[in-house]
Image (cartoon, rainbow, N blue to C red):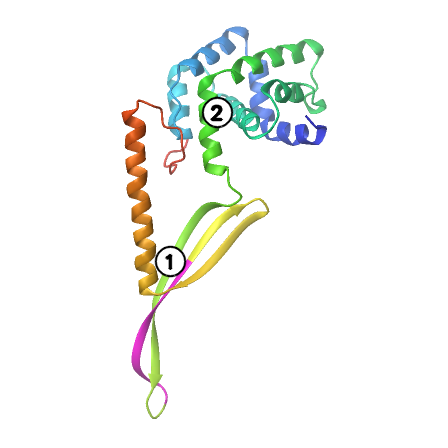
Amino acid sequence: MAKDETAQLVAGLSDGVSVLRELSSGDAEKLLNALRTATPTPSRGRFLRAMRKELPDFHPTGLADVIDALVAIASVVRTTPLSAEQVVHGLSESTSMDLSADERETLVERLNQFMSVQTLQLIAYGLSLRSGGDRWFYRAELVSDIRPVFGGTDGNTPLAAGLSHHLVIESHEPDGHRSYGFTLSEDDLGDLIAVLQDGKAKSRQLRGLVDQLGLTYVGPQQEQEHG
């Protein structure tokens, strides 16, 4: 793993990795066992609350930092050619962590154990479904208003009116936040609504199939909970 890539990764994971490194052997084992038996969910808030119930003695912020760091590392493993061992060793050898040889060995052993947990792998896969493209949806806004047509002898008399619809879609892209605007007619609105309704119906059907097969759903869903 390149040093600059490792530095960027560690910068975002330093709190969680530090908490994990400082856990006692007993607490690390409790966390590992709780993650092994946990049911992955696409909701971060719901998953954290479930973990806090399983581990009431853990500090809530520290637990969230550790889980976020582990999921992030698992996501890196899933979305890059690097193996779990390469990512773990890259993190442990980063000079920004300032570890002794014994501390580095302990961290490598712990991270390797956690990277083998299927729950983390499934959550990482769910995240990759959400952010796997070059452009992903953030929010949308539709502004509609009346546009009068003026005429008459003075040119100021409203003679007719039309409707104007302006759709703004915002997205996150590799080079930053972007906004796109579209002018729509009433027919365009109908076509757009039909496409979205069809997509929602297909989503319900596919989710039903996932449930019928007895599989755990880990794909993206709108996050309504905060943890």
Expressed as whole percent of the image width and height from the top left, the position of residue 49 reads 38, 24
Circle 1 Cα neighbour tier, 10 Å, few/some/many (<14 / 14–19 / ≥20)? few
Query: Which SS type dominates the magenta stretch?
Result: strand
Tell me how far mark 2 sits from mark 1, CA to CA. 36 Å
Vertical placement of 150 versus 7: above or below?
Answer: below
Q: Residue at x 30, y 53 (%)?
A: 194
Tell me whether the residue at label 2 lies in contact with that at label 1, contact meaning CB atoms closer than 8 angstroms: no
Expressed as whole percent of the image width and height from the top left, the position of residue 18 reads 59, 20
Residue 7 left/right relative to 212: right
Image quarter where the C terminus lies is: top left
- In front: 187, or 111? 187
Expressed as whole percent of the image width and height from the top left, the position of residue 192 reads 34, 55
Residue 153 left/right relative to 85: left
Name the residue type under label 1: Leu
Q: Residue at x 48, y 24 (%)?
A: 64
Which badge, 2 or 1, is on the more N-terminal residue? 2
Expressed as whole percent of the image width and height from the top left, the position of residue 220 reads 41, 35
**Which residue is outermost to the bottom?**
153
Q: Which range of residues does the magenta coloring cover?
A: 155-167
Vertical placement of 144 versus 88: above or below?
Answer: below
The residue indicated by pointer 1 is: 142
Q: Residue at x 29, y 79 (%)?
A: 160
Residue 120 left/right relative to 49: right
Name the residue type under label 2: Ala
Q: In this rendering, which labeled residue sits more in front, label 2 or label 1?
A: 1
Q: Which mark is residue 64?
A: 2
Residue at disc 1, secondary structure:
strand
Magenta span contains residue 12: no
Circle 2 Cα neighbour tier, 10 Å, few/some/many (<14 / 14–19 / ≥20)? many
Q: Which mark is residue 73?
A: none
